[in-house]
Image (spheres, rainbow, N blue to C red):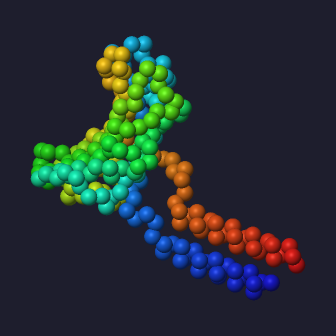
Amino acid sequence: MKKFLCLRIVLLSCLACCLMLIPVAVNAVTISYQGYAVGVDEMGSAGNPLQNAGFSVGDLFYINIDFDETATPNLTGPNYATYNLAIDSFSIAKVGFTANMPGGGYQNFITVHDYNTSGSNDYIDFKTNNFTATPVVSGLTPYYLGVHLSGPFDVFTSTDLPVIEPDPNDFDNTFAILQFYDDSTSSYPFVSIEPLVRSQENPVPEPTTMLLFGAGLVGLAGFGRKKFKK
């Protein structure tokens, strides 16, 4: 019995080592930030729709972005590159509200500026004009989601997309914008969120972690069944 148990442990250990070697979405970069609302600007909208929908200064927001770091730039210049449709998912959410870009959404882009000269700040922008609001904000149409990280001038060494999550601590200025359109007043009320920090929450386990956990459960189940039959 002890030999059988030892053999099972060895086999599971070997499986775990093999699973750790499996490449997991090497071309996908995930950004998980959080920040507090520092402004709720109605921009002249009648009836204060944002405040009526529960938005207020001090609200804690979570920002999540997934993008393909292997995307090819659609527009380039001496110091910048723009990547259209490089964002796979984009959401800005707080308790009771989520602004979410549909999977494979259109009208999204990332711009990377690398000036390499003192006095001109490097920066990266994530933007989409395609998102849905849940719940719907009465009287307003979803218009724009944006995240901006800028400065200092030497934060980037090229205009390529980052291959790891940009650390907000490396930048001088960080903020997110959640913006709507009010057709009745032709105004653009918005919520500004800053500064941004890396999110302290990680509710989604990594695929490799899940595989290891699953392998362990299978092993335990098999051992329990064997013991029960005896």
Question: Which is nearer the eye, 223 or 180?
Answer: 180
Q: Residue at x 69, y 67 (%)?
A: 217
Up the image or down, 198 lies above or below 19; here it is: above
Q: Residue 75: tell me if it is visible.
A: yes
**Left or right of 178: which side holds 77?**
left
Of all residues, the one furthest to the right in this rendering is 230
**Left or right of 131: which side holds 215?**
right
Q: Position of residue 111 (x, y in %)?
A: 25, 48
Q: Residue at x 69, y 70 (%)?
A: 218
**How many marks do you count on the picture?**
0
Quadrant in the rendering for residue 44:
top left
**Left or right of 134: which side holds 113?**
left
Q: Quadrant of the C terminus?
A: bottom right
Q: Residue at x 39, y 13 (%)?
A: 46
Q: Position of residue 54 (x, y in %)?
A: 49, 23
Q: Quadrant of the N terminus?
A: bottom right
Question: Which is nearer the eye, 205 or 81?
Answer: 81
Of all residues, the one furthest to the top in this rendering is 47
Up the image or down, 57 lies above or below 29; here it is: above
Q: Position of residue 136 (x, y in %)?
A: 49, 28
